[in-house]
Image: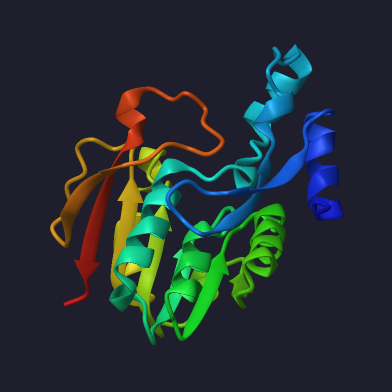
């Protein structure tokens, strides 16, 4: 199976020898176009490092929090069944695809990055689901039953978004492995789950512990 040309070209521009491959996510039946780790066991050049830091290709990884959300929705489809769902900062689209697979009425994958939207489209096709797409969360109407969020709180400047999620949806489900002192009066922790980024980046053990939070608009 050949990788989507536009995504492969974008990755090759960043890392000349990097390849995309269709990988099945551990503990799921989902497949995503992800960076193939087999040919990347080498040191990056200074120029590659600079490009990665400036424009990280986050859409070609399945981050631990996204994987946790995908598994959670597969095990608890009642969270999304027959509901309108928006996946905020969708990245690869893993949570959006999991929601569609679990029976959501409508799923919108929302991301500012055009490459992430392209990745969501390619990954939706790979899994045989239909998604809708948005580049601007704040242009969306307040019509969603559930907002899904994974790996967005890595920057503490994003914490005010916790209030904004409930401006577009009645409920929010947030997965995060970075903020250890997450305190918000509307959010409660449902549990602590374990996953790793795929392909495995050998991240510290602390980043494999993913907290799942839930909030409901009053």
Res. 27 in view: yes
Q: How many tags in the picture? A: 0
Which of 13/185 is in front? 13
In the picture, the quarter occupied by the N terminus is: bottom right
Which of 38/83 is in front? 38
Res. 164 in view: no
Which of 118/22 is in front? 22
Left or right: where does residue 5 sit relative to residue 108?
A: right
On the image, the x and y values in percent for residue 167 come to 34, 73
The colour scheme used here is: rainbow
Rendered view: 50 above or below 124:
above
On the image, the x and y values in percent for residue 67 come to 43, 50
On the image, the x and y values in percent for residue 159 come to 33, 48
Q: What residue is shown at x 62% (from left), y 78% (from top)?
A: 130
Left or right: where does residue 39 sit relative to residue 207?
A: right
On the image, the x and y values in percent for residue 208 come to 35, 34
Q: What residue is shown at x 76% (from left), y 13% (from top)?
A: 45
Rendered view: 154 above or below 114:
above
Left or right: where does residue 168 sit relative to residue 125?
A: left
Tell me the quarter of the picture where residue 40 sits: top right
Rendered view: 184 above or below 141:
above
Q: What residue is shown at x 16% (from left), y 77% (from top)?
A: 218
Left or right: where does residue 118 sit relative to residue 155?
A: right
Which of 207/129 is in front? 129
């Amino acid at each position: 199976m050949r990788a989507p040309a536009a995504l492969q070209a974008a990755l090759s521009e960043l890392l000349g020898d990097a390849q995309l491959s269709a990988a099945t996510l551990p503990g799921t039946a989902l497949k995503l176009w992800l960076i193939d780790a087999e040919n990347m066991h080498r040191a990056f050049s200074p120029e590659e490092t600079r490009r990665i830091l400036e424009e990280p290709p986050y859409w070609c990884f399945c981050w631990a929090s996204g994987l946790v959300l995908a598994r959670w929705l597969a095990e608890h489809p009642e969270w999304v069944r027959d509901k309108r769902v928006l996946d905020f900062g969708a990245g690869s689209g893993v949570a959006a695809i999991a929601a569609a697979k679990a029976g959501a009425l409508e799923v919108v994958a929302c991301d500012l990055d055009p490459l992430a939207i392209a990745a969501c489209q390619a990954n939706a096709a790979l899994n045989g689901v239909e998604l809708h797409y948005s580049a601007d969360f704040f242009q969306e109407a307040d019509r969603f039953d559930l907002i899904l969020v994974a790996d967005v709180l890595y920057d503490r400047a994003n914490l005010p978004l916790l209030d904004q999620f409930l401006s577009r949806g009645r409920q929010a489900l947030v997965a995060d492995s970075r903020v250890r002192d997450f305190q918000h009066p509307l959010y409660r922790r449902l549990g602590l789950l374990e996953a790793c980024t795929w392909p495995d980046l050998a991240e510290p053990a602390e980043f494999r512990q993913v907290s799942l939070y839930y909030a409901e608009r009053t």
